[in-house]
Image (cartoon, rainbow, N blue to C red):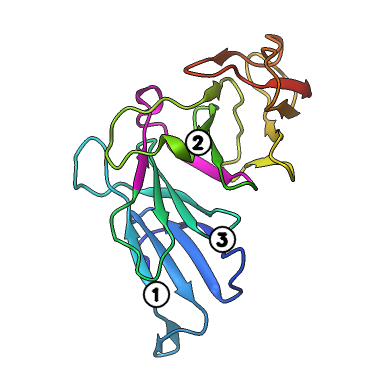
Amino acid sequence: GHVMEVNNVVWHPHEKNLVLTSSLDGTLRLWDLLGQATFGCLINKQVLKLRSAQQGTARVSATTCAYSPDGQKIAGGGADGSIQIWYERRTLSTRPDAYYLWKEVENDPVLNITVSYDNDKFVVRYESGRIALWSFQQASSTSSNIPPLWVLNNLPNLYPSANVIFNHDSSLLVCCSSPHADDPHSRLHFFDLHSTTPLPSTTSSLTQPTHTPPKEVLS
């Protein structure tokens, strides 16, 4: 099993006996509740290893994990700011099938990954308070610099487990922010992904790597 702190546990979206975990030991582990056990302890089904962008084969701490809603993709977030993806199949490779790392968030730990219900894109929350959206079509098998579709800045949260979620048709994003120097209030933010109107500057700043950021419709 894991040899360091476990920081996330998620159920497989369709297989009721399968569980995915992530740990600071640099691995994601798959567990089958009906699988092999020894001395009363369950043995993990498979180990997936996150690799550092800066040091090639060096391992990097895993900070979160996620399944896609269709169960066909496994995502792991790293302490180096990378998102590493495995495609579900009978035997998974130890190394990721796809790798996302944008230089602007290098070494900014990933705290949450959520895949959209259409299984086409995913949103990431970083420790710095950034939120970024990627498409799976941007996948790279290397650690090359890949800018996200858009980035929202200045949305910090004091709780590492705070997430970002899509609505049922993946047209809206919802996240929360803690009080900070620019805003003394806790807020719940709603963003329209189909809008081309920029965010109000009174609630958060933004950068635009490749696409127009979503409109905030309520906070």
Residue situated in front as seen by the camera: 185 or 204:
204
Quick check: can you spot residue 197?
Answer: yes
- Label 3: few (<14), some (14–19) or many (≥20) C-alpha neighbours in 10 Å: some
Residue 112 highlighted magenta (yes or no): yes
Q: Which residue is mark 1?
A: 45
Magenta span of residues: 98-116
What secondary structure is found at the residue carrying circle 2? strand
Q: Quadrant of the C terminus?
A: top right
What is the x, y in percent for residue 29?
A: 41, 65
Q: Earlier in the sequence, mark 2 or mark 3?
A: 3
Quarter-of-image position of residue 42: bottom left
What secondary structure is found at the residue carrying circle 1? loop
Q: Earlier in the sequence, mark 3 or mark 1?
A: 3
What is the x, y in percent for residue 16?
A: 61, 74
Q: Which residue is found at the position 28% from the left and 31% from the top?
A: 144
Q: Which mark is residue 167?
A: none
Q: Which residue is mark 3?
A: 10
